[in-house]
């Protein structure tokens, strides 16, 4: 049986990279799979979060997911900290994973930078919690953007070592699902940096909460190079900004990159940007309006998340029981 799990941090602005790289694919998957989607607030606090802002961002993220088309009745949509089994399995995985594996994680190296001695221990152990998120449901497939691929490999390593150490096939080895033209949406200010919630410049990203004027303005101001758009996809080589804008256009319109390039061949950036802005507004406008509506009804959103948490906890319980039994914990 196939089961999908994926997670997203409520650590700031939900942006076009999250939408095209992850959420849009989740919306498509819900028709074919049993899906569990989690707002990972416990991952968010691996770096400092203002408590009131974290709570507000968690609701805002849930509203964004519902507005984007994730059906909370058909899927399990919930908040990580409301299901204790994630933290409980993460502890077991802290004892399965090796320091050397964690030391190799590029996301930790990027986030810690020169500040290694002074970041939280949670930031270092982060991949163990992520492995627990996935494996506490015995999920088989995990849709993510490119940047999470290494964490998925880590999850497979943890599952495999657990199974071998205890001589039981407790966990499946989950597969990453990475698809679409926008597996890595880049910053609008620098085609070689990923679009991210933590970029200090708001012009680097299109937020799901941006209105039509803000979207058009950010696209107009996006960095480009002096040449017209290329005739073929090979012509994008060495032109990261052109490649990024065309990739975004392809993902927004559901076209292949080759078709998007053919459509824009030889255009001046200014003209192409107008087309891109129209496509972005057409896609995000209705989502934005629904988010605004849901923002007025926090009790409705909280109710959905509470029910989602109850469903998730019921799915996780037998798996955690099996793990505790396997590890040799004395059961009540
Ligand atoms: P997070 O919150 O940084 O991002 C959520 C999802 O959005 C994708 N994404 C992007 N895709 C394309 N281009 C971008 N610029 C871009 N930025 C973000 C991410 O790949 C991700 O799919 N560790 C995870 C959260 C997590 C998780 C999990 C994911 C925790 N537990 C279990 C899957 C399964 C994270 O920080 O994603």
Image: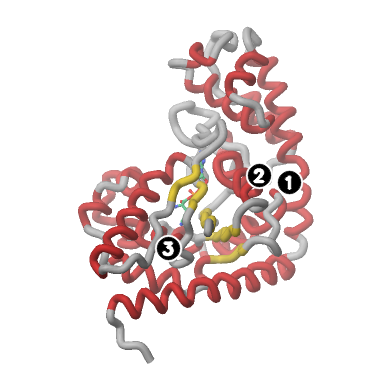
For this view, does 187 lie left or right of residue 172? right
Residue 135's disc number: 3
Residue at 58%, 48% in the rendered image = 13
Relative image position of residue 27 (x, y in whole percent) = 65, 48
Figure quadrant of residue 255:
top right
Q: Is mark 2 within 8 Å of ligand 1?
A: no
Residue 208's disc number: 2
Task: Reply above or below: 167 against 328.
Answer: above
Relative image position of residue 133 (x, y in whole percent) = 45, 62
Q: Are marks 2 and 1 in contact (CB under 8 Å)?
A: yes
Figure quadrant of residue 248:
top right
Looking at marks 3 and 2 on the same chain, the residue that comes earlier in the sequence is marked by 3
Task: Reply above or below: 166 against 112.
Answer: below
Relative image position of residue 45 (x, y in whole percent) = 44, 61
Q: Secondary structure at mark 3?
A: helix
Query: Which residue position is annotated with label 1?
Result: 288
Q: Residues within 10 Å of mark 2 (few under 14, many from 20)?
A: many
Task: Reply above or below: 60 against 184.
Answer: below
* Quadrant showing the C terminus: bottom left
CA gap between label 1 and label 3 equals 33 Å
Task: Reply above or below: 166 against 44.
Answer: below
CA gap between label 2 and label 1 equals 6 Å
Q: Secondary structure at mark 2?
A: loop
Residue at 64%, 68% in the rendered image = 305
Q: Nearer the viewer, mark 1 or mark 3?
A: 3
Looking at marks 2 and 1 on the same chain, the residue that comes earlier in the sequence is marked by 2
Relative image position of residue 266 (x, y in whole percent) = 63, 7
For this view, does 52 lie left or right of residue 126? right
Q: Are marks 1 and 3 in contact (CB under 8 Å)?
A: no
Residue at the farthest left position = 100
């Amino acid at each position: 049986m196939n089961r999908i799990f994926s997670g997203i941090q409520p650590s700031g602005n939900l942006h076009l990279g999250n939408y095209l790289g992850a959420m849009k694919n989740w919306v498509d998957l819900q028709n074919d799979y049993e899906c569990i989607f989690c707002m990972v607030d416990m991952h968010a606090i691996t770096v400092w979060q203002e408590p009131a802002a974290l709570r507000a961002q968690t609701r805002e993220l849930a509203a964004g997911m519902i507005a984007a088309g994730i059906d909370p009745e058909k899927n399990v949509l919930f908040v990580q900290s409301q299901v204790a089994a994630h933290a409980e399995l993460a502890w077991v995985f802290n004892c399965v994973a090796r320091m050397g594996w964690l030391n190799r994680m590029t996301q930790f190296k990027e986030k810690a930078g020169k500040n290694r001695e002074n970041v939280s221990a949670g930031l270092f152990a982060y991949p163990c919690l992520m492995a627990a998120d996935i494996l506490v449901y015995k999920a088989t497939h995990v849709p993510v953007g490119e940047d999470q691929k290494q964490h998925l490999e880590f999850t497979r390593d943890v599952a495999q070592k657990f199974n071998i150490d205890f001589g039981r096939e407790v966990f499946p080895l989950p597969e990453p699902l990475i698809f679409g033209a926008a597996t890595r949406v880049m910053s609008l200010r620098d085609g070689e940096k990923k679009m991210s919630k933590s970029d200090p410049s708001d012009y680097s990203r299109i937020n799901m909460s941006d209105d039509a004027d803000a979207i058009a303005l950010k696209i107009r101001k996006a960095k480009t190079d002096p040449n017209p758009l290329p005739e073929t996809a090979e012509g994008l080589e060495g032109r990261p900004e052109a490649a990024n804008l065309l990739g975004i256009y392809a993902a927004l319109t559901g076209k292949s990159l080759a078709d998007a390039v053919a459509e824009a061949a030889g255009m001046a950036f200014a003209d192409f940007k107008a087309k891109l802005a129209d496509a972005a507004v057409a896609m995000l406008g209705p989502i934005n309006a629904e988010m605004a509506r849901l923002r007025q009804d926090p009790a409705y959103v909280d109710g959905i998340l509470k029910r989602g948490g109850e469903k998730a906890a019921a799915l996780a319980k037998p798996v955690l029981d099996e793990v505790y039994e396997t590890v040799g914990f004395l059961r009540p």
